[in-house]
Amino acid sequence: MAGVARGRRWLTDGRAAREHEPVPEAPDRSRRRRWSPWAPGRVRERRWSPEVRNRAREHRWFPEVRNRAREHRWFLGVLGLGAVLRVITMLGYRPAIWFPDSYTYVVTALKPRPDLVRPAGYSMFLRLLEPLHSFALVALVQHLVGLGIGVLVYLAARRLRVPGRAAALASAPVLLDAYQIELEHLLVSDTLFAALVVAAVLLALSREVTRRTACGIGLLVAAATLTRTVGLPLAALFAAWLLYRARGRTVVAGVMLAAAVLPVLGYGAWFHATYQRVGLVGANGVFLYSKTMAFADCAVMRPPPDLAVLCDPRPPAERPPSQEYIWSADAPLVRLPGITFSRENDALAGRFASLALRSQPLDYLGSVAGELARSFTWDRPVYPDAEVYGYYEFPAEPPPPPGRYPATVGAEFAQRYERGPIGTEIVEPYAGWMRAYQDAVRLPGTALLAILVAPPVLAGLRRWRRWRRRAARESGRAAWALPWAVALLLLVMPAATAEFDYRYVLPAVPVACLALVLAAGKPNLPNIP
């Protein structure tokens, strides 16, 4: 009985204790809980109640994305339109559009060996994509690179406190210009070259240029030089910029120069081992000779007999474009024994060009100015001839197969690369849409001239106003100087060393537009007077 009493007392005490325990609150059904086998007794609740949805929207990532999209809506609209235009281009011209230089690039890609006329940078780009066996994918990558150039221009402008609309406007020429889109669809090196240059400018405009940043700039300049030799003077230009604004000036500039020069020296060693010649290409003398034939007068130069064989008795006004003195079968240099770019012929052409420059320096400067002025015309007159000019227009009919011997050999290598036919197929109505678009939308040369003239004019007006107000110097206002100088160099070098070509103008456009918006805005960049 005692045991029973103790049991009843225990039950009574337990019941009393439970009666005094606080009643647990009902679980919050709006909280999203997941059922787990290791948590028995937990009830899986409704997943899509209004409270759950509202809380998820507060904590998920898409509100931030929506805000970012609203902030960059102008640029996203331009970028989207540029992407649509490139898709139409790929649908209308399959797999790509060929240029006479394209075949040489493909030969070097499949048979890695330095070329006498062009460095192998773009060929190595093709080599990287060779496992895909598709020139359509090469064109796709180049279109993506073109879109990337527009993104880089926009990012550089926004990072330096340029308003969104102005930054989007700066990226519009490279994203929407019809000739830029056509150039990306050509199998040539200019799109890759432009991307490397714009990336180097973007790094050089960083808020703090460290040794690592300088190394990146140097490598990009080296890659640009090995893509097109006109990029070589950029190394000196970027070094001067880093000396102007970077901390640890000499060390940073030295790191950049070392990173730019070492890969170029390595390529030069490869070229020397192949041809026993010093340089990156073996055509510098030939191209400079063709440049001087626009004004060279042997009656003024009085060349020795070994150079007199390169004279043209016709007056300069009646002579053909400069390129004819390299590729035409009846050109004086082409008629000499051996190939045009042999060591002896290149040296002979270089001596003739040097004599012409020493004898007629003012005529040379006038020729350079005349060639440079072609970049700034409102319309696009046919130059240097109808054949080359036609390669920069979206064609209405499939281009014929190559006729010259080097190009025919390159076509065979291109078929090996593609593992199939390489002819350009024109598909309507997409091709017709792009032809109509090209007739209507382009950046006129006169507009490019205004873009180049505006930055120094705006900078001069700003300095004059500051001088009148006796105001203190504002940091970062000279950030426009680097992209402006790069654009000017890219325009002057081809006119000074070879001849004008419309495709040489396009790589200068994105950096020129960036210079304009930086000069018009108030960039925030330290260590720049």
Image (spheres, rainbow, N blue to C red):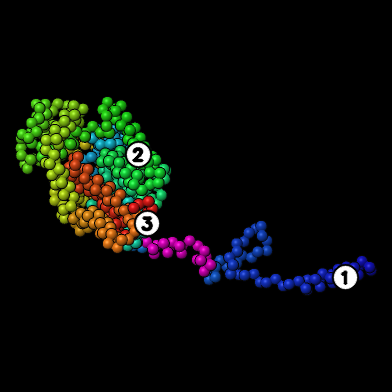
Specify few, some or many for label 3: CA neighbours under 10 Å numbering under 14, 14-19, or 20 or more. Answer: some
Q: Secondary structure at mark 3?
A: loop
Name which residue type carries label 2: Leu
Mark 2 vs mark 3: which is more N-terminal? 2
Image quadrant occupied by the N terminus: bottom right
Mark 1 vs mark 2: which is more N-terminal? 1
**At 37% across and 61% down in the image, what residue appears?**
72
The residue that mark 2 highlights is 257
Q: Nearer the viewer, residue 225 or 92?
A: 225
Mark 1 vs mark 3: which is more N-terminal? 1
**At 34% across and 53% down in the image, what residue appears?**
529
Q: Is residue 100 magenta?
A: no
**At 9% across and 30% down in the image, what residue appears?**
303
The residue that mark 1 highlights is 9
Residue projecting furthest to the front: 470
Q: Nearer the viewer, residue 37 or 75?
A: 75
- As displayed, is residue 358 above or below residue 370? above
- As displayed, is residue 400 above or below residue 19? above
Separation of disc 1 and disc 2 at Cα? 94 Å
